[in-house]
Amino acid sequence: FNKEQHRFVAGEEWQRRLLQASVPRSRGLAFPPAPSPEELSSNLLETYLPETVYSANTTLKDRRDVMAALERAKSPVREVVVRGQTIWTVHPMNTQAWRTIGRADEPEAFVDFAFHKDPVKRDAARELLNLCLNERLRLEGVIWSVAEEMFIYRPRAGEGRRVRKSVRGDRRETKMGLLHVTPYQGRIVRCRHAAMVAQFRSIGCKYYLQIEPTWYFSRGGWKHPRWEDLIRGIRLMQKEREFHAALRLWREILTQERDLVRGEYPFLRFGNYLRFEAPVSIPDELWRKTSDLSLEAADDQDDLMFSK
């Protein structure tokens, strides 16, 4: 404030200027803290698409007829999409089984197929990715449940023992449960299976697998009759740390390399979760406040769902 250059006008701006002018020089200069960037992780798992998609013209009616013809030819192929009289698959069509089904066309790069301007091709590409995901997870003992619309860990050896998996963390490796068994008086009263709801998302020129970890409860090989109450209870107990741990578990499953027990699936691979960098650090209090509000909203919704 300079009384020779500035004209005094009553208001908030001039109050601030007068207060600043009244601060003694002995107090020195005060600067706000320098912004510290923070890395944020999402639940979007980077997806490496198949290299090639193969197509053929057929006279068969639908996918059911095509799969029946492949089974008669003793072909193990399951990743097949049929639209009208066109078949798409990630498997080469140079075998005798395919020659009896249709006339093969020129192969196409899958990335061009997935981002084609034709919505029919884009829809077929997404369905092919879902079929590839089914086959990839089948190697890990994870199956797709049509009734529950989720992927559930169901080991072939049965549900009589606890199953844990080594998961790499930022600092160390930990064991996480794929299957938790609860015994009582010599019998198994319930099993808690690791499960997830997954959906492919296209962002820009890339595909990501959006993962929502959850649980599935069973008893005697069937869905537990109190499944709704059990899943509601575990949601109340879980916090952000458990959610991120479950995300790491599914990343470990989907990026598991080939070994002596597990075969390699060549058509679909995954990387790491998509990460962002915020220009400033976000206070933990804001994260907790948002999470608490989301949890309360989820609880209210659960109360509405389970009161029916």
Image (tube, helix red, strand yellow):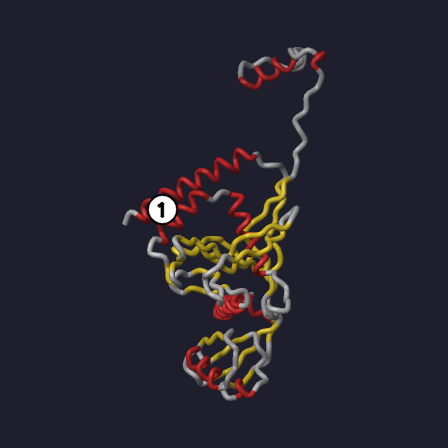
Label 1 sits on what residue type? Asp
Q: Which residue ends up furthest to the front in the rendered image?
A: 186
Residue 227 appears left or right of 95 = left
Q: Nearer the viewer, residue 217 or 68?
A: 217
Q: Secondary structure at mark 1?
A: helix
How packed mark 1 is, by other alpha carbons closer than 10 Å (few <14, some 14-19, many 20 or more), is some
* Residue 27 higher or lower than 173, as above or below: above
Q: Residue furthest left?
A: 308
Where in the figure is residue 66, as x and y percent of width and height? 46, 81
**Foreground pick, 161 / 233:** 161
**Horizontal and vertical percent for residue 305?**
32, 49
Query: Which residue is drawn at the image coordinates 66% and 36% (left, top)?
Result: 36
Residue 292: which quarter of the image? top left
Badge 1 is on which residue? 302
Residue at the spot 32% in from the left edge and 46% down from the top edge: 304
Is residue 125 visible in the rendered structure shown here? Answer: no
The quarter of the rendered structure image containing the N terminus is top right
How many numbered marks does the figure carry? 1
Q: Is 53 situated above or below 218?
A: below
Quick check: 125 left or right of 269?
left
Looking at this view, is 163 or 42 the one in front? Answer: 163
> From the viewer's perspective, is residue 280 above or below residue 21?
below
Give the image location of residue 71, x and y in percent.
Answer: 47, 82
Asked if residue 289 can be seen in this view, the reply is: yes
Q: Is residue 162 above or below residue 292?
A: below
Q: Nearer the viewer, residue 131 or 140?
A: 140
- Image quadrant where residue 149 sits: bottom left
Question: Whole-percent x and y of residue 69?
Answer: 46, 84
Which residue is at 38% across, 50% downward?
230
